[in-house]
Image: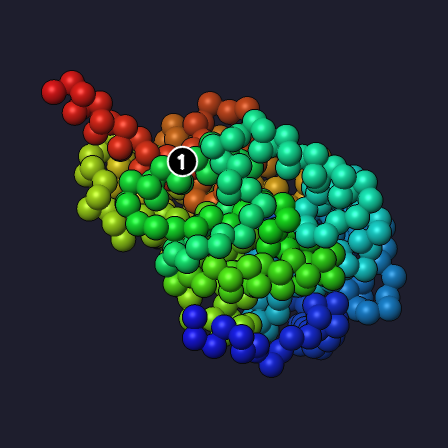
Amino acid sequence: MNGQNEKNKDSTPTKTYLPEKVSEYIERCTECNRCMEVCPVTKDTFSINELNLASQEGHIVPLKIKEFAFHCVQCGKCVPVCPEDIRRDYMVRYIKYKIKSKKPLGYKRYLFIKGPKLTGMRRITQQLFIRLKKLTNKDLSCFMETTPGKKADVLFYPGCYIYSTKTVRQTLRLLNHLGGSYNVLGGVTSCCGAPHLLQGEFDQADDCTERLYQKIKICDPQIILTACAECFETIEQIIKKYRMDVEILSVAQYLLRYQDKFPSKKIRRKITVHDSCRFHAQSPQGIAAREVVSLFGELAESPRDQPSSCCYQWNHDSDPDNALRQANYLAVVKKKAPTLACNCFTCYEELKKTYTDVEVIDVLQLFEEALEASDTIEEER
């Protein structure tokens, strides 16, 4: 890694940097309301002027905007429509920081055991959780909460999703099939900090990100893989901040580089791709997911006028309308295809909990099914 010890000049803490940006954004805002019009959660109970005022440092956040802030899923749909290049999602993120002491129980529960060097009951609960998971998943225990000591060109970073054992085992099987060496870095003590950042816990987010950078530096990879869109975004920022000479790819992107090592066989019919907030359809990760689906099945694109495809994970069920929005989205998907392939761990974990006739899969499952289909044919011969 060339220049891995050289930091970007901008190392200002988030809680210092963000209010300055928010102030700049407010000065530029023309109150055109486009950000509000595309928001999947706003109920139009306040004006954009009220939202701007609540975003400012030192201003009180009214109750109706507190509710909105905790319903916000940080999907970023408000960003590309802004004619002034304003990050409205950052502005709401700063509101979350201002009211972080009043966050709903779902937010607190989600963060309870995430992060390094916890104290008190959080530390005890975290250690009990880790021990239980290691006992019940002995084949993965060597990857949990450890920093690899050996060198390998590829680092698979599942982050907190190391405990989503089905998807992790699936990914490890696919990487083993390719035959190269790799390291795995994951666990709640190696959290990337995105969950904290999206909830306004800026100090914890910055600490997690810094510690993750130190662990990546020890691993010294040439390529980092992750299937979590939030982890991907954080690692992109780490690479930029520390000027690291390392490539970040989604797992699907990486596997497609070696698609000749997988059977070229159509194993499914129509499949729709679920685009996450950060792995949108036109992103390299979204394009890769579509290539995978086209490789092993028939791609069925969702109609452009569909309701928001957001999985609504990041408001932690504080908004009672989440379930209805998910049901409406999946009803549209059902008209196009019986299967929905997710290109992000977070979306997969959230949507698979929804009761629906649509089969929700991780896009990586298609690679695994292709291998299994090939093995079956060989056995029959």
**Residue 344 at x, y percent in the picture:** 48, 45
Residue drawn at (18%, 21%), measured in percent from left and top? 379
The crowd level at tag 1 (other Cα within 10 Å; few <14, some 14-19, many 20+) is some
Q: Is residue 152 above or below residue 269?
A: below
**Which residue is at a point 22% across and 23% down the rendered structure image?**
376
Q: Position of residue 212 (x, y in %)?
A: 58, 59
Q: Position of residue 319 (x, y in %)?
A: 71, 39
Tell me: 293 left or right of 63.
left
Foreground residue among 323 and 112 = 112
Quadrant (top left/top right/bottom left/bottom right) for the N terminus: bottom left
Amino acid type of disc 1?
Gln
Q: Secondary structure at mark 1?
A: helix
Residue located at (84% from left, 51% from top): 101
Q: Quadrant of the C terminus?
A: top left
In this rendering, does residue 340 appear at all? no
| Residue 115 percent location from the top left of the image | 68, 50
Question: Residue 215 vs residue 202: left or right?
Answer: left
- Tell me the residue that label 1 is attached to: 170
Residue with the most extreme left position: 381
Q: Residue at x 58, y 66 (%)?
A: 82
On the image, which quarter does residue 245 sit in?
Answer: bottom left
Most extreme residue toward the top, as rendered? 380
Q: Nearer the viewer, residue 173 or 16?
A: 173
Nearest the eye: 27 or 269 = 269
Q: Quadrant of residue 203?
A: bottom right
Residue 208 visible in the shown view: yes
